[in-house]
Image (tube, helix red, strand yellow):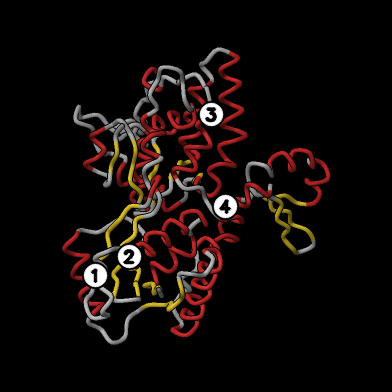
Amino acid sequence: MKAYFLYKAAAQFAALKVEAAEQVVDVLLQIKSAPDADTTGLATQLIGPLCTANGGPWVSAFAEGEEVTVVDLGEPEAEEAFALRVSALASADRRPTVGGVSLDLPTARLQETVRILVQEEGRLTNAVAAAPASTSRLVPALCARAHRWRTTELRRDLRQVLEQAVCAPQLIEREGRELLLIDRELLERFDSPLSAAALAEQFANNRLAPLDLTSVTERAPEPALQLGRIS
Amino acid sequence: MAGWLLGPHAFSELVAGQTAGHRNALMEWSRTIQDGLYVTELTVAYVRSVAQLKPPRDRMAWLAELDGQVPIKFGSNLLPVSRAHWIRWSEVRLELDPQGRELSFTESVDVAVCLVEDFGYVSPSVHLGSIVQPFKTL
C-alpha cells in the first residue's frame, strides 16, 4: 500500500518519535486488511479520526484502493468538516500531497523519506519548508535565551558558566565571534521538546511535598499612577 | 492552539509527582493530550517562592527540582516573558474576577502569554476561562 500525506500531515509525521510513527503506520496498514476495505480503486473510504493506542497521535485519512492519503495527525476536526475536506481532495486531479511511498519501508526510513520530500516540495514552491519548525528556530531560540559572557568574565567565572550551561544556553563573545555553550540534554530538549505525556513521565517518580499555593495570596499590583497624589 | 500553559497550581502539581494517597489529576490529564506543556519563568519563580516556606528538607528538594531539573525537562517550553507578552499584559491586567478584584499578577501575565502564543491555560481559577480559550481546570 502506498501512502500520501498532505503537507501539514507530512510535517507532523516526520516530527513524530519513531514509536508514535509506528502506531500511525499500523493504523494505515490495518486499512488494507479490514474485511470491508474497498479494493476496486473507485470508492473513497474515510478513515478516522482514529486515536492510536496509549495516547498516540490521532489519524485522519482516506483510502482509495491500494492508496491511502493522510490528512491530519493532530487534534481531530468535526466529522462533517472532515468528510467535506476529504470529498474536496478526492475529487481533485492534483492534490497538495507528498509521498507515494510504500508503507512497507522501515518506519524511520519512511519518516526520513517524507521529511526530505517535504523539504524538496518547499524548495520547489519557494514556501517555508514544512520540516519540523523547531529545526529552523533552534539557533534563534537558543541565542535569545542565552546569558552573554565576555571572555574576561569567563576566565573569572568559568565554574559558574559551566554550572549555568546545564540549565540554560550560555553565549560567549570572543574576538567578534559568539560561542554557544549548552548542556547536551538541554540542547536536545530545545530541539525536540517533550510531549505532555513524556513530560509527565519525567516527573512521575517525584515525591515532593505538595505546595499550598492558596495560602500565599497575591496582592493586586498598585496602580502605577496615583492621580491626585502627585504634588 | 499551540499548546497548554500551566498556571502555578498546575505546574506545582506536575512537578510534585505522585504523592501517596493523592491523585495527581494534572499528571493523568497530561498523559492523554498531544499538545506540548509550557510554563513561564515567572510561574516557576512564583512556585519557587512558595517552596521557600516549606521545612528545610522539603524546601531543598523543591529547589533542586526547580533549579536543576525543570529547565532541562522543559527545555524551550520554559518561556521567558517577552516584550510582546508585557504589551499584551498591559491590556489584560485590569480584567476583573467575579468578585470584582483584579487578577493576580502571575495569572494576568499567564493570560497575556496565552493570548500572544495561542496557548490554552490550565488553572483552577475558572473565571479565566472567559478570557482564555481553550481552558482546563482539574
Left or right: A180 with respect to B10? right
> Can the viewer see residue A231 in this picture?
no
Under tag 2, what secondary structure?
Answer: helix
In the picture of the structure, the residue carrying the numbered disc 2 is A31
Q: Residue furthest top?
A: B55
C-alpha span from label 1 to label 3:
44 Å
Name which residue lies at 56% across and 17% down: B58
Measuring from the top left, give residue A98's x and y in whole percent.
42, 77
Spatial separation of the CA atoms under disc 1 and disc 4: 39 Å
- Label 3: chain? A
Camera-nearest residue between A148 and A6 = A6
Give the answer, above or below, for where A170 lies relative to A15: above
Task: Name the residue beneath numbered marker 1.
Answer: A45
Residue under pointer 3? A205
Q: Earlier in the sequence, mark 2 or mark 4?
A: 2
**On the rendered image, what quadrant is the C terminus of chain B found in?**
top left
| Residue A96 on image: x %, y % | 35, 79
Q: Residue at x 45, y 18 (%)?
A: B20
Which residue, given by chain and number where applicable, does mark 4 sit on? A190
Query: Outermost residue toward the right?
Result: A155
The answer to whether any part of residue B13 appears in the image is: yes
Inspect the image, locate mark 4, and give the three-letter code of the amino acid beneath it. Phe
